[in-house]
Image (cartoon, rainbow, N blue to C red):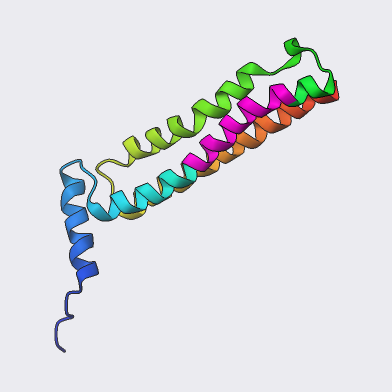
């Protein structure tokens, strides 16, 4: 049986594993991390849109400015980058699949918190 030929993908994954042992991100992990970063950036954009748009919406409905859930709106902006940073830092010195699992879990946590923030803001509308 002949040995399996090494492909460029094998070499990239080996390079990533070497960088992981040094506590750095290899280029494969950086590319995948950047893709997850875009997903977290979308959640950040949603938080910013809520922070800017919800007070205007409340004003149009005639709801008092004191009823605006500022803490919830600010948390919606702060949470996505904080969770992404935490997942990335926890992923240092871990293998690529472990990093991906951390980023997926972080994305799920961030999305769950965003939905919770939306529910809290809707509850203030209901009374």
Residue 127 location (% of width, % of height) = 85, 20
- Secondary structure mostly seen in magenta is helix
Query: Quadrant of the rendered structure where residue 5 is?
Result: bottom left
Task: Answer above or below: position of 64 versus 12.
Answer: above
Residue 110 location (% of width, % of height) = 54, 37
Rendered residue at 77%/22% (across/down) = 58
Q: Is residue 47 magenta?
A: yes
Query: Quadrant of the rendered structure where residue 84 is?
Result: top left
Rendered residue at 81%/17% (across/down) = 63
Task: Answer above or below: position of 55 versus 13.
Answer: above
Farthest-out residue, top: 66
**In the foreground, 3 or 70:** 70
Residue 119 location (% of width, % of height) = 72, 32
**In the foreground, 127 or 91:** 127
Viewer can see residue 113: no
Numbered range of the magenta stretch: 41-56
Q: Is residue 88 magenta?
A: no
- Would you say 92 lies left or right of 18 here? right
């Amino acid at each position: 049986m002949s040995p399996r030929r090494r492909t460029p993908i094998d070499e990239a994954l080996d390079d990533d594993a070497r960088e992981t042992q040094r506590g750095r991100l290899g280029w494969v992990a950086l590319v995948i991390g950047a893709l997850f970063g875009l997903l977290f950036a979308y959640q950040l954009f949603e938080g910013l849109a809520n922070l800017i748009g919800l007070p205007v919406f409340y004003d149009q409905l005639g709801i008092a400015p004191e009823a605006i859930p500022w803490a919830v709106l600010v948390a919606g902006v702060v949470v996505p980058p904080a969770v992404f940073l935490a997942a990335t830092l926890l992923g240092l010195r871990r293998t690529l699949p472990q990093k991906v699992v951390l980023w997926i879990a972080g994305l799920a946590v961030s999305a769950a918190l965003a939905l919770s923030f939306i529910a809290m803001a809707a509850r203030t509308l209901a009374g």
